[in-house]
Image (spheres, rainbow, N blue to C red):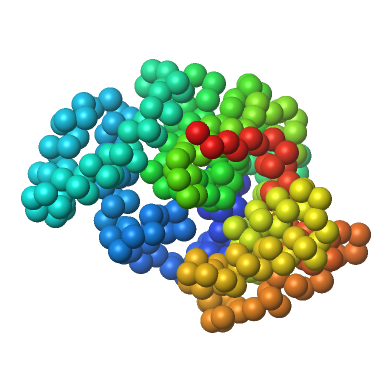
Amino acid sequence: MVALDDLVSFVEHPVKEFLRQRVGLSLFTAEEQDTDALPVDLDGLARWNIGDRLLRDRLAGRPLDRCRQAEWRRGELPPGALGEQVLFQVLDDVEPIVSAAQPYLRGEAGDRDVDVTLPDGTRVVGTVGGLHAAVLLRVEFSRLAAKQRIRAWVRLLALTAATGEPWQAVTIGRGQKFGLSKATAGPLDPDRAVAELADLVALRRAGLREPLPLPTQAGNTYATVRRGGADPAGALDEALRKWTMGAGAERADTAHVRAWGPNAGAEVLSVPGPAGGEPTRFGTLALQVWSPLLTAEDVVRL
């Protein structure tokens, strides 16, 4: 039996979950958040915490003025006019997200238990929340990134496979540079959902035997570029940028450092793949995970 939450966590970050689920090594720190999606400010984490709380309160239907007062009472804002400015700026980000989510907020959010028996007899069991009518909705103050999209995809597969119903996953977050982004996937054919879920469970089984070279952002980039018509070499070059370059380079992730050492280079993603597939093992894995989602998904700027 596989817990749905464990499967979701694995697909989001295979190496981290290898270390946690197989080795028993927790990499959690008090500062851990969706840091790949936080605003790039000196006070980015504090702003994210304030924004996330305000977003949850506003989505729950609490009046704007009451939400503002609650933030002041928490004592986390700077005093006086500076605090007012911070609160105004954060609400300026929050309110458009709330507006974008309104068409999907049909009644109270519901939950569904899922229990899927795969063709090999493995059961995937868990609970999927955030259900509004036929929509699996997730609204984020974070920037919409690959992690949020693949998370919604795995839950959509499980929900569709378990119920046979035409569910749709909608994930709304801030844009990468400005504005908002919305990712929509589904409805899916239930038989397809079972098959895709089985592939991910098999991938997890392999990924608990060894760390898989499948960083999330790089994998998404590789599959996206390949689908755009680029050859494997061109797609790998783009993926390596996510792996090695900039402040958010994935090789600097704590789990990846534990697996491959500090400043791991192109060699991690360049191991040859199996015959008949992509030239690299990374490329084969990236297409396995991301191609089904990219085929079913529509990402738009709002």
What residue is at 51 percent from the left and 39 percent from the top? 181
Q: In this rendering, is residue 191 above or below 236? A: above
| Percent coordinates x, y for residue 171 in the rendering | 51, 36
5 relative position to 281: left or right: left
Residue 270 image offset from top left, x and y in percent: 75, 72
Q: How many marks?
A: 0
Left of 260 or right of it: where is 188?
right
Residue 201, position as x, y percentages in the image:
67, 49
Residue plotted at (59% across, 33% down) = 184
- Residue 53 in view: no
Q: Is residue 257 left or right of residue 232?
A: left
Q: Nearer the viewer, residue 89 or 61?
A: 89
Which residue lies most toward the right here?
Answer: 276
| Residue 229 vertical position relative to residue 93 in the rendered view, above or below | below
Question: In percent of the image, x 53 and y 76: which residue is there?
Answer: 257
**Residue 177 showing in the rendered view:** yes
Task: Name the image quarter holding residue 169.
Answer: top right
- Residue 117: x, y in percent? 67, 37
At x 72%, y 67%, the residue is 237
